[in-house]
Image: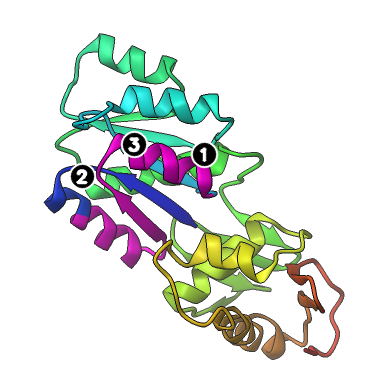
């Protein structure tokens, strides 16, 4: 899942990026409201962590501009303000949740998971495709009751597929959601990681749920038990 962090305090921005990256998210960071509006408009994010106290335009204005552009990624607002009026204003301008500084990283993660479940369409607590289950809270993956160990990037790729089950996702789609904005490597890395996933979620179980549609991209679907193939 791809997250935009909007925070002008360099130290806090760095801590959030490192922590979220370690949790398997792809993270872009900006420090101004203008950059936040541009990135949030031009890129497809799964959620936005937005500080209110920015130096150019504040988080309320950023939120309003994004909603005015039809960008509906869930927004979690961060602020040192804890007044009732500020919370009301933040929610009224289109934010989905509100977290007052100082906060625990564990709480921020829990709130993000809640937003991801309900934002942008159906987001159930447990993602399932046939007998393949993914729990975003524990980051555990099981197939037919057997636990599957994945790296952080493999997990992020699988979560993206499962949140868009039965949809064909191009290599560009996957790069946009799983790798961050600064990625400038070989886009064929997607092919490599799809292969890694197949080796873990399909081949050991005699399945072929992760499909390649030549010239279009990839999709995950519920399939009948059959020998896996590429």
Q: Is residue 108 left or right of residue 138?
A: left
The answer to whether 103 is drawn above or below residue 162 in the figure is above
Sequence-first tag of 1 and 3: 3
Which quadrant of the structure image shows residue 79? top left
> In the image, residue 25 lies at what x, y percent?
41, 61
Sequence-first tag of 2 and 3: 3
> In the image, residue 70 lies at what x, y percent?
59, 30
Residue drawn at 50 percent across, 57 percent down: 1
The answer to whether 107 is drawn above or below residue 213 in the figure is above
The answer to whether 132 is drawn above or below residue 76 in the figure is below
Whether tag 1 and tag 2 are in contact, CB under 8 A, the answer is: no
Task: Say which mark, if any, is on residue 34.
Answer: 3
Secondary-structure class at tag 1: loop
Whether tag 1 and tag 3 are in contact, CB under 8 A, the answer is: no
Q: In this view, does 76 lie to the left or right of 120?
A: left
Q: In this view, does 214 lie to the left or right of 39?
A: right
Q: Residues within 10 Å of mark 1 (few under 14, many from 20)?
A: many
Would you name the residue on which mark 2 appears? Answer: 104
Would you name the residue on which mark 1 appears? Answer: 73
Q: Bounds of the magenta span?
A: 14-43
Q: Is residue 84 magenta?
A: no
Residue drawn at 20 percent across, 29 percent down: 53
């Amino acid at each position: 899942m791809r997250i935009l962090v909007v925070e002008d305090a360099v130290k806090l921005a760095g801590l959030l990026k490192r922590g979220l990256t370690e949790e398997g998210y792809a993270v872009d960071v900006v420090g101004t409201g203008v950059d936040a509006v541009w990135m949030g408009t031009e890129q497809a994010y799964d959620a936005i962590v937005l500080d209110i106290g920015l130096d150019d335009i504040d988080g309320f204005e950023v939120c309003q501009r994004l909603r005015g552009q039809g960008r509906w990624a869930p927004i979690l607002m961060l602020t040192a303000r804890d007044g009732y009026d500020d919370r009301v204003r933040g929610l009224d301008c289109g934010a989905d949740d509100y977290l007052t500084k100082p906060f625990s990283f564990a709480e921020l993660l829990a709130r993000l998971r809640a937003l991801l479940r309900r934002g942008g369409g159906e987001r159930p607590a447990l993602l399932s495709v046939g007998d393949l289950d993914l729990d975003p809270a524990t980051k555990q993956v099981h197939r037919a009751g057997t636990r599957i160990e994945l790296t952080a990037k493999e997990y992020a790729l699988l979560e993206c597929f499962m949140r868009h089950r039965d949809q064909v996702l191009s290599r560009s789609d996957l790069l946009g959601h799983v790798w961050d904005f600064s990625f400038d490597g070989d886009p064929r890395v997607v092919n490599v990681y799809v292969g890694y996933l197949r080796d873990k979620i399909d081949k050991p179980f005699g399945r072929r749920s992760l499909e390649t549609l030549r010239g279009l991209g990839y999709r995950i679907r519920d399939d009948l038990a059959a020998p896996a193939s590429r």
